């Protein structure tokens, strides 16, 4: 059953009314010391970025009490989430209205995702292992290559500095959820280390409401089966990391993440998956002077899925991705930085499905310039990717910023992007087309922002045109480059502290249109709401901290024909923390307080009202 519609005008009016009066009266400074590396491949303060960027730090992650990466990102500027039935179920992310496989996801700088499906398994990334998340909105293919048409999301696992200290968390919640995590880390002399483990398990709820098999809902719709049972999820994860500075100019670090999941769901061919997500990486940094920084990186990502139906194996997929890069940053003059580098990637496939090709590599070179001339900023980059399957592809970007003073800045940028076809697109037996070309995009962004001592706000408008989209071609009965899309949108964010209340508001409007010839011309792209809003409010009262998160999304359509409409919705979460002692914190949360019924994918249920309680031990320096 779908919820009643949360209309677009109501959503925007409510959120703006909540945000703007407070912004004008803010009294205290917000934290503007965050840096983002995903937008330029070098450390840049968020307020100096020429492309829209956001950082969610560890403190904000813990304060949100989010129990999944999707929950943490839901409703943030430019982001919409679609989930197929709760914890551990397939979760896709649309950034600025682009396709879910048009977002590049990195874990500690290593590209993550399935080379066959072309998607990262966001649902299996354990949030207890995450230190911070960077979000860069808009094409970054000129620096990172394929996938970055909508933008880049980079997840960083925990880092340890200062004294060696442990951390422990235990939690329980609705649907028989039980959680535990523990770790230890810190610095010793010239080195540092860290190790964490985490476990979460839930009995879940019925992921899919089935079909009913009646005339209104004929069998074959929805999830193609009726299985009215609980669909649980289990995730066990561990991270290891460490680093050592041999001298003041030479440092080495390494990290490893492994997450093993077991997810139950509803399906006629597969209803259980056992998954593995593994990321390994190492970096060697040499800084012979304050004008030269050299970085060598090696990494590997494994994405594995064993699929079953009622305990009988129905399929096996494993993709392995090796990556390496060499990058040099050179300060050629005051406030002038030149970056050049080489990236190499090798994808390999093992599967019970017989692919005609099971391996391909990609070699790329890139150059970037960043300069500041008084009130003017300039950023330009170009990259060429030589892919074993589709040959050479060149992308570029150009950004400009002008500072008016008092923290007020105008930015403008243009960029091109591309997405290489996945192994499924190219080689899946009977359904692949080895002659596919990369999907391409052209994007423009205009922004204005102000970062002041008492508050900060940003406003961006953009357009992204995507050509050669891969879709099923009824003329050749195979996927082909026949579709195109035009996406326009706007985003507004404001963060401030007022009378002790920390308030963050994020509003997004996107108009993702199908521009392909045919009956679906000018329809909205599927599973993307045109309007979203998120408001986070937190306040400390001595040893007690309270908070709320309001999320809202307008209506969306579940199909290209725009005949399957999913109503808009809004949810409210309430949070409470109590510092029992300096190192001990008790947290409680009520999610979806008003028990709203809604769907982000047709037929797939979302959680109603939920409860969570956890105890955290985390000594401070």
Image (spheres, rainbow, N blue to C red):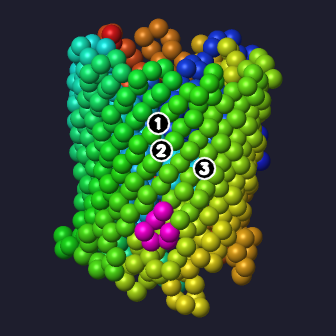
Say which residue appears at 40% left-offset and 78% top-offset: 427
Hey, which residue is sitting farthest bottom in the picture?
A: 475
The residue that label 2 is drawn on is: 341
Quarter that holds the C terminus: top left
Check disc 3: other Cα within 10 Å, few if <14, some if 14-19, many if 20+: many
> Does label 3 or label 2 sit earlier along the sequence?
2
Q: Are marks 1 and 3 in contact (CB under 8 Å)?
A: no
Q: Is residue 42 left or right of residue 180?
A: right
How packed is label 1: few (under 14 Cα within 10 Å), some, or many (20 or more)? some
- Indicate whether 566 appears above or below 57: below
Is residue 422 part of the magenta span, yes or no? no
User: Residue 328, which numbered label?
Assistant: 1
Residue extending farthest left = 311
**Is 410 left or right of 615, judged from the image as shown?**
right
Image quadrant holding the N terminus, namely: bottom right
Compared with 185, 241 (above or below) is below
Give the magenta range: 386-391
How crowded is the residue under tag 2: few (<14 C-alpha within 10 Å), some, or many (20+)?
A: some
Q: Is residue 390 magenta?
A: yes
Could you tell me how many numbered marks the image carries? 3
Q: Which badge, 1 or 2, is on the more N-terminal residue?
A: 1
| Kind of element beneath mark 3 | strand
Q: Secondary structure at mark 1?
A: strand
Q: Residue at x 40, y 54 (%)?
A: 344
Q: CA distance from mark 1 to mark 3?
A: 15 Å
Name which quarter of the figure residue 374 lies in: top right
């Amino acid at each position: 059953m779908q919820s009643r519609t949360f209309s677009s005008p109501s959503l925007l009016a409510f959120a703006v009314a909540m945000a703007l009066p407070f912004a004008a009266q803010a009294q205290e400074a917000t934290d503007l010391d965050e840096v983002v590396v995903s937008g330029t491949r070098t450390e840049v303060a968020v307020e100096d970025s020429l492309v829209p960027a956001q950082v969610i730090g560890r403190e904000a992650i813990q304060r949100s009490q989010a129990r999944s990466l999707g929950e943490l990102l839901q409703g943030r500027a430019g982001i919409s989430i679609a989930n197929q039935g709760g914890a551990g179920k397939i979760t896709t992310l649309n950034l600025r209205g682009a396709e879910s496989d048009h977002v590049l996801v990195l874990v500690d700088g290593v590209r993550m995702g399935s080379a066959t499906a072309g998607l990262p398994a966001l649902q299996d990334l354990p949030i207890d292992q995450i230190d911070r998340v960077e979000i860069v909105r808009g094409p970054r293919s000129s620096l990172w290559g394929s996938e970055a048409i909508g933008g880049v999301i980079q997840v960083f696992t925990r880092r340890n500095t200062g004294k060696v200290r442990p951390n422990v968390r235990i939690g329980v919640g609705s649907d028989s959820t039980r959680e535990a995590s523990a770790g230890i880390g810190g610095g010793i002399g010239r080195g540092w280390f860290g190790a964490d483990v985490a476990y979460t398990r839930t009995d879940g709820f019925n992921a899919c409401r089935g079909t009913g098999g009646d005339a209104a809902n004929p069998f074959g719709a929805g999830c193609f089966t009726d299985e009215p049972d609980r669909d649980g999820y289990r995730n066990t994860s561990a991270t290891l990391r460490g680093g050592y500075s041999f001298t003041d100019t030479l440092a080495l670090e390494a990290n490893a993440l492994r997450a093993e999941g077991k997810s139950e769901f509803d399906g006629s061919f597969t209803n259980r998956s056992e998954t593995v997500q593994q990321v390994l990486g190492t970096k060697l940094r040499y800084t012979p002077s304050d004008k030269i920084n050299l970085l060598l990186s090696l990494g590997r990502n494994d994405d594995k899925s064993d699929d079953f139906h009622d305990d009988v194996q129905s399929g096996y997929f494993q993709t392995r991705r090796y990556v390496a890069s060499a990058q040099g940053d050179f300060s050629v003059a005051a406030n002038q930085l030149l970056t050049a580098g080489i990236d190499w990637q090798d994808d390999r496939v093992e599967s019970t499905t017989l692919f005609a090709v099971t391996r391909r590599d990609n070699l790329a070179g890139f150059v970037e310039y960043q300069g500041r001339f008084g009130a003017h900023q300039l950023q330009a980059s170009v990259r060429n990717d030589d892919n074993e399957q589709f040959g050479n592809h060149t992308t570029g970007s150009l950004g400009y910023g002008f500072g008016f003073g008092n923290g007020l800045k105008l930015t403008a940028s243009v960029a091109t992007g591309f997405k290489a076809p996945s192994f499924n697109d190219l080689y899946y037996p009977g359904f692949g087309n080895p002659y596919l070309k990369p999907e391409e995009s052209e994007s423009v962004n205009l922004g204005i922002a102000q970062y002041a001592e008492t508050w900060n706000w940003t406003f961006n408008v953009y357009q992204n045109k995507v050509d050669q989209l891969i879709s099923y071609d009824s003329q050749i009965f195979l996927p082909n480059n026949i579709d195109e899309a035009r996406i326009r949108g706007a985003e507004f964010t404001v963060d401030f502290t007022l009378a002790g209340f920390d308030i963050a508001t994020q509003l997004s409007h996107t108009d993702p249109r199908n521009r392909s010839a045919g009956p679906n011309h000018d329809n909205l792209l599927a599973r993307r709401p045109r309007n979203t809003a998120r408001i986070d409010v937190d306040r400390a009262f001595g040893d007690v901290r309270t908070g709320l998160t309001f999320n809202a999304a307008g209506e969306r359509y579940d199909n290209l024909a725009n005949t399957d409409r999913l109503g808009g919705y809004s949810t409210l979460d309430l949070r409470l923390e109590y510092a029992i002692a300096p190192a001990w914190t008790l947290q409680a949360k009520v999610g979806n307080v008003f028990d709203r019924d809604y769907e982000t994918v047709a037929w797939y249920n979302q959680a109603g009202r939920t409860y969570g309680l956890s105890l955290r031990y985390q000594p401070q320096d």
